[in-house]
Image: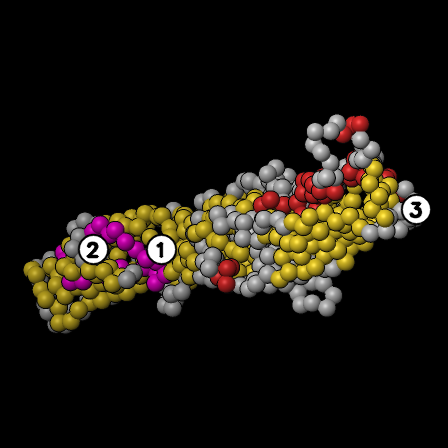
């Protein structure tokens, strides 16, 4: 990284040009090696010609070519960006419900002996004075699943696959005396949704089938399917369907009856007495079990979404790793995507943990977030819900005020652990025995915009000063002064400190050369840049000490706030729009100066 304002690239040429100016009266035809070029300046000063720089952009200053985590986006803004590692999708499953038969029993439904009403019992067809009717349960059953999935909270309905065959039979006496029933009705429990009926001409109203003019010579065969079980059915006269929770155990109980009602008005008499005749209807029912393939209700499936991914922070530029750096960013963001096909909404809360050298730097809890059913959920976890965040069109924005603390010191790794669960308060349709998938992914997206405590540290130096000063003999009070007017178009205050180093890069011992810096470079506030006078003095405290000076090492702290000035926050650093320019650069050697130009 080079901070060109203080670079020897301009300092050394200025010093050389100044020396040439002093020796300008020398005839250029002379061999300078043969001329005594020692010049005494006395108690005055040696001033080198003034200079200015061009605009020095942040792109010139910040070296991020090898950075993997700090990039420039399309408009030149600097962004700290790191993607989390790939995470395997999580499976979510509720096993199928199988409701099996416990008991099943059929009954005869018997007509009362018909009343001829004075009609002589002689052979022939007769019409009775009134209908003879019967009504009763022809079949009673009980089914259950005593090991139903514990994830069931409540049920409104269940889609099932169960075909049935109901064979209605007529007694021999009914066949003999009653060749045709004027009507016959078969009614199933109200919670059964029966479909696909295959039977002679009939009408259907819910769970009731009605037939007219039913011949009794053969069985009435009804085939169909139970397509759905309705847990909300109010009519319980023919049975109940219940989801039960008892001591942590979940069960489904299904009990019911098939009701038959029938009537006839005509008979065929043969003169035999009717008193001993039995007029009845019976049934055979083939219905083995109910397999629930999906259900509507409230569910609490186990979601083993414990890891939302790790992000390894690599390729960090040096200006973010210097001592004293505080990465207090205005609005860092965690962009979380949960891509799933689960038919029930979910909820997830998490913990972000930053590690450095294996130790925990910071842990942050992330409040509960919603996982939208059967869709891709985009969530922005941020410090400030500002206009830029709103423009992202996220499904949710979760504000975590302390989010910047996660990277105040750049970590080696950030992990995102989670606890997920279904939203059991919502009623949804859930496929049973089906693997749903949820795949998480996230990235850290942190525009380099300062918050109050931000501090980025730059270090640089003026090098090889000893070669410029070796031929200059300086008095005890001699000093090197560098002054400039610095126009800062960067949204940060620049606090500059400096120390003197020898040719080995060691700081000179106390009492030899003292370097002072006067002035804090004012920050660009987003509207206009300002110019700040800056003065750097390297003062010799021991005779000859300046000859040991080889480098002036500068530490430049870019901060959001400084004493006596308002904080400058929320402005993203830009590679080309933000720059520094120095005018009226002046380099002076003050004190008694003797220059040997030989």
User: Mark 3 or 1, which is nearer the eye?
Assistant: 3
Q: Is residue 17 left or right of residue 504?
A: left
Q: Is residue 204 left or right of residue 340?
A: left
The span shown in magenta is 172-199
Image coordinates for residue 172, horizontal then vertical, percent: 21, 52
In the drawing, what numbered circle is on residue 173? 2
Residue of label 1:
228
Q: Secondary structure at mark 2?
A: helix
In this rendering, does residue 37 appear at all?
Answer: yes
- Dot 1: within a 10 Å radius of its alpha carbon, few (fewer than 14), some, or many (20 or more) residues? many
- Dot 2: within a 10 Å radius of its alpha carbon, few (fewer than 14), some, or many (20 or more) residues? some
Q: Foreground residue, 31 or 313?
A: 31
Q: Considering only order in the chain, which callout, 1 or 3, is on the residue closer to the N terminus?
A: 1
In this rendering, does residue 549 appear at all?
Answer: no
- Dot 3: within a 10 Å radius of its alpha carbon, few (fewer than 14), some, or many (20 or more) residues? some
Instruction: Determine the CA span between mark 1 and mark 2.
Output: 38 Å
Instruction: Determine the CA span between mark 3 and mark 1.
Output: 100 Å
192 in the magenta segment = yes
Image coordinates for residue 152, horizontal then vertical, percent: 50, 56
Residue of label 3:
542
In the drawing, what numbered circle is on residue 130? none
25 in the magenta segment = no
């Amino acid at each position: 990284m080079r901070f060109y304002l203080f670079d020897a690239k301009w300092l050394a040429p200025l010093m050389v040009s100044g020396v040439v100016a002093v020796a300008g009266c020398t005839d250029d035809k002379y061999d300078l090696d043969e001329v005594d070029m020692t010049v005494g300046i006395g108690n005055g000063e040696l001033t080198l010609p003034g200079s200015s720089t061009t605009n020095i952009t942040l792109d010139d200053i910040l070296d991020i070519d090898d950075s993997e985590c700090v990039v420039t986006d399309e408009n030149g803004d600097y962004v700290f960006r790191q993607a989390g590692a790939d995470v395997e999708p999580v499976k979510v499953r509720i096993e199928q419900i199988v409701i099996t038969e416990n008991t099943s029993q059929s009954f005869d439904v018997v007509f009362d002996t018909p009343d001829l009403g004075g009609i002589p019992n002689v052979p022939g067809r007769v019409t009775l004075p009134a209908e003879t009717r019967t009504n009763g349960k022809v079949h009673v059953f009980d089914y259950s699943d005593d090991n139903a999935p514990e994830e069931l909270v409540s049920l409104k309905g269940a889609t099932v696959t169960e075909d049935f065959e109901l064979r209605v039979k007529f007694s021999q006496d009914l066949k003999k005396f009653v060749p045709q029933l004027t009507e016959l009705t078969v009614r199933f429990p109200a919670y059964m949704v029966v479909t696909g009926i295959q039977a002679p001409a009939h009408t259907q109203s819910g769970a009731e089938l009605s037939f007219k003019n039913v011949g009794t010579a053969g069985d009435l065969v009804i085939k169909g399917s139970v397509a759905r079980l309705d847990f909300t059915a109010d009519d319980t006269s023919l049975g109940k369907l219940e989801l039960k929770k008892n001591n942590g155990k979940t069960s489904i109980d299904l009990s019911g009856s098939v009701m038959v009602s029938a009537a006839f008005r005509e008979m065929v008499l043969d003169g035999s007495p009717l008193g001993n005749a039995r007029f009845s209807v019976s049934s055979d029912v083939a219905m083995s079990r109910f397999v629930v393939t999906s259900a509507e209700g409230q569910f609490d499936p186990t979601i083993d979404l414990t890891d939302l991914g790790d992000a390894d922070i690599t390729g960090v530029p040096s200006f973010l790793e210097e001592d004293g750096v505080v990465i207090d960013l205005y609005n860092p963001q965690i962009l979380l995507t949960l891509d799933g096909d689960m038919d029930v909404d979910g909820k997830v809360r998490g913990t972000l943990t930053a590690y450095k050298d294996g130790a925990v730097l910071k842990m942050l809890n992330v409040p509960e977030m919603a996982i939208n059913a059967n869709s891709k959920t985009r969530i922005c976890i941020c410090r400030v819900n500002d206009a830029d965040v709103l423009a992202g069109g996220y499904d949710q924005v979760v504000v975590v005020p302390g989010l910047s603390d996660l990277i105040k010191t750049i970590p080696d790794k950030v992990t995102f652990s989670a606890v997920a669960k279904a939203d059991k308060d919502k009623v949804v349709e859930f496929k049973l025995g089906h693997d749903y998938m949820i795949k998480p992914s996230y990235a850290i997206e942190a525009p380099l915009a300062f918050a109050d405590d931000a501090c980025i540290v730059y270090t640089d130096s003026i090098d090889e000063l000893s070669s410029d000063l070796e031929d200059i003999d300086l008095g005890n009070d001699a000093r090197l002064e560098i002054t400039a007017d610095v126009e800062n178009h960067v949204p940060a205050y620049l606090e500059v400190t400096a120390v003197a180093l020898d040719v080995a890069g060691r700081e000179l011992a106390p009492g030899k050369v003292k370097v002072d810096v006067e002035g804090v470079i004012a920050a660009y506030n987003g509207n206009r840049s300002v110019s700040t006078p800056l003065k750097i003095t390297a003062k010799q405290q021991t005779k000859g000490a300046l000859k040991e000076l080889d480098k002036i090492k500068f530490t430049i702290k870019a901060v959001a706030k400084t004493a006596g000035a308002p904080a400058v926050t929320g402005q993203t650093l830009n590679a080309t729009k933000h720059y520094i320019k120095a005018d009226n650069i002046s380099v002076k050697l003050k004190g008694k100066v003797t220059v040997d130009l030989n």
